[in-house]
Image (spheres, helix red, strand yellow):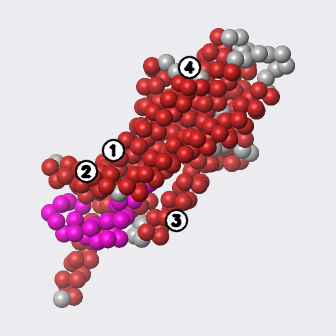
């Protein structure tokens, strides 16, 4: 346990010492928040207003709360995964600079080493994502706040779940990387593509039926919807309270992916949680299996090298 804690401390320290990596991880979600609010915010606002029945008056606070909740939920859903990849690059850098070989030569089990990287990445990612979540909550407080204390707690629980998911996903992929070029390529692909396939940048309702049904097999889609439900829950209740017809509110939920449909069958929030937690457990199992096979491969190579001698 002592070695495990030392490894976590060492990895977190190295991450925090790398100012470029920390700055990139921290600035990226904040820049996205500014870009979302500046450009996408106006588009979402205009679209929402244009779909209102003629003569139906809605306060700007409700509109801003709806738009802000959609933007912030998108940002959080993406950041928990992309930041995890940035924080986990240390595992690959240790391979590149030879630090991993030195650690393997020390009396530290391979499993302890792998868990040390994972736990340190979870901590580093969590810190950055909680800061980003705090910035989103401040933005909502300034534009249109409808969140209850329970909503905020649920959003924070979503951040934890998505961070665990993003971290184990990055750990599996980064296990197979061994150069800085590969790090850059993977980072670019994840940053550019993940937001689209999880429904963060563009709601799934805007996709064709084929694409929509395909991405419903991806766990990240359910994570995005969970954050959406908890970020928009308060403002949707307020819309019902001020006289919005139930059909209109349901249509809004469908359009922003609060309601998900798996081949036209509605998916409950409980199922979304089950999918995310199940995916995390499965990926952790895959990560453990990869490391067990890696240890066996190393032992085999050692036996072969001794036999040659």
Can residue 70 be seen here? yes
N-term-proximal mark, 3 vs 4:
4
N-term-proximal mark, 1 vs 2:
2
Is 28 placed left or right of 294 in the picture?
right
Could you tell me residue 134's position as x and y percent? 45, 33
Label number found at residue 123: 1
Could you tell me residue 223's position as x and y percent? 52, 38
* CB-based contact (under 8 Å), mark 1 and mark 2: yes
Secondary structure of the residue carrying tag 1 is helix
Q: Residue under label 2, please give it.
A: 8
- Residue 33 occupies which quadrant of the picture? top right
- Residue at 35% over, 50% down: 121
Q: Residue under label 3, please give it.
A: 185
Q: CA distance from mark 1 to mark 4?
A: 29 Å
Secondary structure of the residue carrying tag 4 is loop
Q: Nearer the viewer, residue 267 or 43?
A: 43
Q: Report crowding for label 2: few under 14, some 14 to 19, many 20 or more residues within 10 A (C-alpha).
A: many
Residue range in magenta is 85-111
């Amino acid at each position: 346990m002592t070695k495990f804690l030392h490894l976590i401390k060492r990895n977190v320290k190295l991450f925090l010492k790398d100012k470029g990596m920390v700055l990139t991880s921290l600035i990226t979600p904040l820049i996205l928040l500014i870009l979302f609010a500046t450009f996408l915010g106006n588009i979402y606002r205009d679209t929402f207003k244009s779909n209102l029945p003629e003569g139906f008056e809605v306060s700007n606070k409700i509109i801003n709360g709806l738009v802000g909740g959609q933007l912030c939920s998108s940002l959080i859903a993406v950041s928990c995964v992309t930041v995890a990849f940035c924080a986990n690059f240390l595992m690959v850098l240790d391979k590149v600079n030879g630090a991993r070989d030195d650690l393997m030569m020390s009396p530290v089990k391979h499993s302890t080493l792998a868990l040390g990287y994972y736990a340190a990445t979870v901590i580093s990612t969590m810190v950055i994502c909680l800061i980003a979540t705090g910035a989103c909550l401040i933005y909502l407080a300034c534009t249109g706040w409808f969140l209850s204390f329970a909503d905020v707690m649920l959003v924070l629980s979503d951040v934890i779940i998505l961070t665990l998911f993003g971290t184990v996903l990055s750990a599996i992929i980064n296990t197979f990387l061994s150069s800085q070029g590969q790090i850059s390529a993977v980072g670019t692909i994840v940053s550019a593509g993940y937001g689209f396939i999880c429904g963060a940048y563009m709601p799934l309702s805007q996709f064709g039926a084929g694409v929509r049904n395909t991405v419903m097999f991806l766990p990240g889609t359910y994570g995005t919807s969970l954050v959406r439900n908890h970020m928009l829950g308060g403002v949707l209740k307020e819309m019902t309270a001020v006289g919005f017809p139930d059909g209109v509110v349901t249509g809004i939920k469908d359009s922003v992916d609060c309601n998900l449909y798996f081949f036209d069958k509605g998916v409950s929030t409980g199922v979304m949680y089950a999918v995310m937690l199940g995916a995390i457990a499965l990926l952790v199992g895959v990560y453990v299996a990869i490391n067990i096979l890696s240890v066996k491969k190393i032992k085999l190579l050692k036996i072969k090298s001794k036999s040659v001698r």
